[in-house]
Amino acid sequence: MNSIGLIDSFSEFKQMKNIDRPTMMKVLEDVFRTLLRKKYGDVDNFDIIVNTDKGDLEIWHKREIVADDAVENPITQIGLSEAQKIEEDFDIGEETYEKIELESFGRRAILAARQTLASRVGDLEKDEVFKKYKDRIGEILSAEVYQVWKKEILLLDEEGNELLLPKSEQIKTDFFKKGETVRAVVKRVDIRNGTPVIILSRTDASFLSKLMEGEVPEIFDGLIVIRNIVREPGEKAKVVVESFDDRIDPVGACVGVKGSRIHGIVRELKNENIDIINHTQNLQLLVQRALAPAKINSLDIDQDKKRISVYLEPDQVSLAIGKRGVNIKLASRLVGYEIDVYRENEEGDEEEYDIDLDEFSDEIEEWMIDELKKIGCDTAKSVLALSDDELVRRTDLEEESILEIRKILESEFQEEK
């Protein structure tokens, strides 16, 4: 057996933690019953004994002793004279048990069994990994960086299972090196070519939710519940919380004394600014809280179009919009309405607020926006205020590009009218 190396294969199985012992024994028995069936046809008279602790097995052939001239089936019967060669005391009607040496099957059959066994065990391990992580979706885990690629990072858990952290699931400022420990949430488990692929995320809302659950005992105990989370990973997040105990301030409990509870989460999220908002069923009040720190004068809600027009003092508009429009974008996602911001001038007339050029990044190429910013045009109206000739003269943009940009900017204001 040692020459074939089969025992070495079996001994590996006792170290497999993902497969329970009964399942492992069943697989081994099935593989060798197939081997016996190919050689003998009938396998009812064979016993397979698996020792998972030592990592080996034994095969015993049971036959009934009959007279030498009465042997009809050599698989189930053995002649008396042949049986007495095994043990002299044997008599007709008794049973013999002979040990089948694995070498008797032949080298090719043994190697085929070894491959089948490895394949079956591999499939079982994959199933166990799939079940394990399918049940852990939404949980935070720590894993070690094994390899860093351009589009994803390969990590290993404590059992050596491979996990993937795609670039799209990383915070923009994340930078990891081999051997570093990374915390992330299990987002989903995919099957690719029959192999489970565990996808982790640091940008998903559930990652922030679980981090807060770990830092805020009241959330873990169920006294405070997280109603909603919206994130712009690495920049800003808004979390709506509600307390089931009137004595507990949900916002204060989440922030902690001098920010003690929220600071650790902010560091983990690469200084992501987190706004904690007290839950309310009042939509107007929720909008006011979502746009904080800006102070709203008034607002109009269009239920049919799912749009909200918000009116503020001129000095409050930039606060409502936020850096690169992140604050208003998150507020819109939080309340489920598109929010339009307007400013009120001194006479009380309403004037539509200018729009930051970065808001058009999905329609205008970034290098074009940068060209316009170089000449001091960082908003839509500042671009529209200049003539086409002047824009061509002052930037490196072609006239055709200028006309296309103007068309995009003007259509935005036309839509809002």
Image (spheres, rainbow, N blue to C red):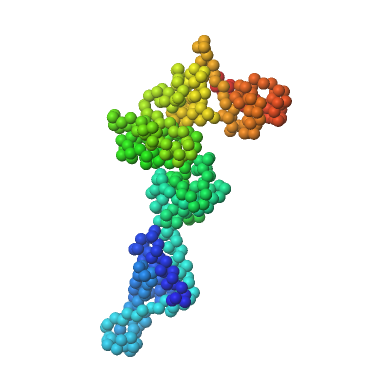
Label count reads 0
Q: Position of residue 205 (x, y in %)?
A: 44, 38
**Quadrant of the rendered image containing residue 105:** bottom left
**Residue occupying image coordinates x 45% and y 20%:** 296
Q: Position of residue 36 (x, y in %)?
A: 40, 74
**Residue occupying image coordinates x 49% and y 21%:** 316
Q: Is residue 310 visible?
A: yes
Q: Is residue 137 visible?
A: no
Which is more toward the observer, 349 or 33? 349
Which is more toward the observer, 130 or 77? 130
Which is more toward the observer, 244 or 104? 244
**Above-or-below relation of 204 to 391:** below
Quadrant assignment for the C terminus? top right
Taking the image as shown, residue 176 lies to the left or right of residue 70, namely right
**Above-or-below relation of 336 to 150:** above
**Residue occupying image coordinates x 48% and y 55%:** 194
Quadrant assignment for the N terminus? bottom left
Q: Residue furthest top?
A: 347
**Quadrant of the rendered image containing residue 324:** top right
Taking the image as shown, residue 247 lies to the left or right of residue 104, namely left
Taking the image as shown, residue 395 lies to the left or right of residue 346, namely right
Q: Position of residue 274 (x, y in %)?
A: 44, 33
**Residue occupying image coordinates x 44% and y 37%:** 266
Which is more toward the observer, 291 or 416? 291
Taking the image as shown, residue 13 lies to the left or right of residue 348, namely left
